[in-house]
Amino acid sequence: MRYPLVTLIFAGILLCAPEAGHAQQVATAHHLGAQLRAFVGPAFLYAVQDVGNAAVDKATGFGVVFNFALGSMVSEDLALNMDLALAHSPSAAHGVLDDSVFSAVHLGAGLTYWWMPANVFLAASLGMARTSVGGSPVRLGIEIPVNESSDVGIGTHLALGKQFWLSRRFCLGATLSLLASAANNPVGGRDTSRYALVTTAALTATLH
């Protein structure tokens, strides 16, 4: 009976050895060199603008957001990166407009800080932003703008995420993200700022 038991123990060691090796490899993984981080997930888009006479113009909708951050580690825990975020809602609510399409874009430069070995990151970027709302107007006997694209304004993007190493150069996890912008938008004879927010909880990945 002793030999079958020894055989089973030996087989178990052989089966566990690759897993142990993988665990050791992941435990020593760290961020270095060029870095591409991306996420995609459902989003809520919101915009508001003062149009005068104590009235505001609002647009809200659910959609999807894509984000790509390309950069490089400049120290053990800090990366510099370019940041591109695209948000889109195909059926937003916008006053009397039917089937409104609400889009937001952000292009900026920023930083990503990693807390290791927890593999938690905080990213922030500042740059250019623009929003657009358009749709088919309800017939009210007056001219209603079908598309409202803001000027290029200023935007900021914040992201907080947690990732898990799948290999020494690739990790996968989740991110909470907030995109905010302000840009002039001529509407109703007034050139006031449209303020926009995009929030999301997304699946994220980082590749070195």
Image (cartoon, rainbow, N blue to C red):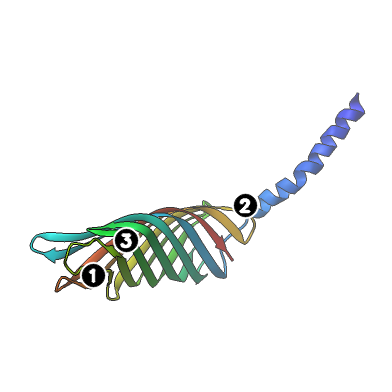
Secondary element type, mark 2: helix
Q: Quadrant of the C terminus?
A: bottom right
Lower position in the chain sequence, tag 3 or tag 2 = 2
Q: Which residue is depicted at the point 12% across and 60% down?
A: 55
Residue 27: assigned label: 2
Q: Is residue 129 left or right of residue 145?
A: right
| Quarter where residue 57 is shown | bottom left
Query: 178 or 21: which is nearer to us?
Result: 178
Q: Position of residue 166 (x, y in %)?
A: 62, 54
Lower position in the chain sequence, tag 2 or tag 1 = 2
Q: Mark 3: few, some, or many residues within 10 Å (few <14, many ≥20)?
A: many
The amino acid at mark 3 is Ser
Residue 100: assigned label: 3
Q: Position of residue 17 (x, y in %)?
A: 76, 45
Q: Residue furthest bottom?
A: 152
Query: 139 or 98: which is nearer to us?
Result: 139
Mark 3–mark 2 Cα distance, whole angstroms, equals: 48 Å
Q: Is residue 139 left or right of residue 10?
A: left
The amino acid at mark 2 is Ala
Query: 27 or 186: which is nearer to us?
Result: 186
Q: Is residue 16 above or below residue 40?
A: above
Q: Position of residue 25 (x, y in %)?
A: 67, 54
Q: Which residue is mark 1?
A: 145
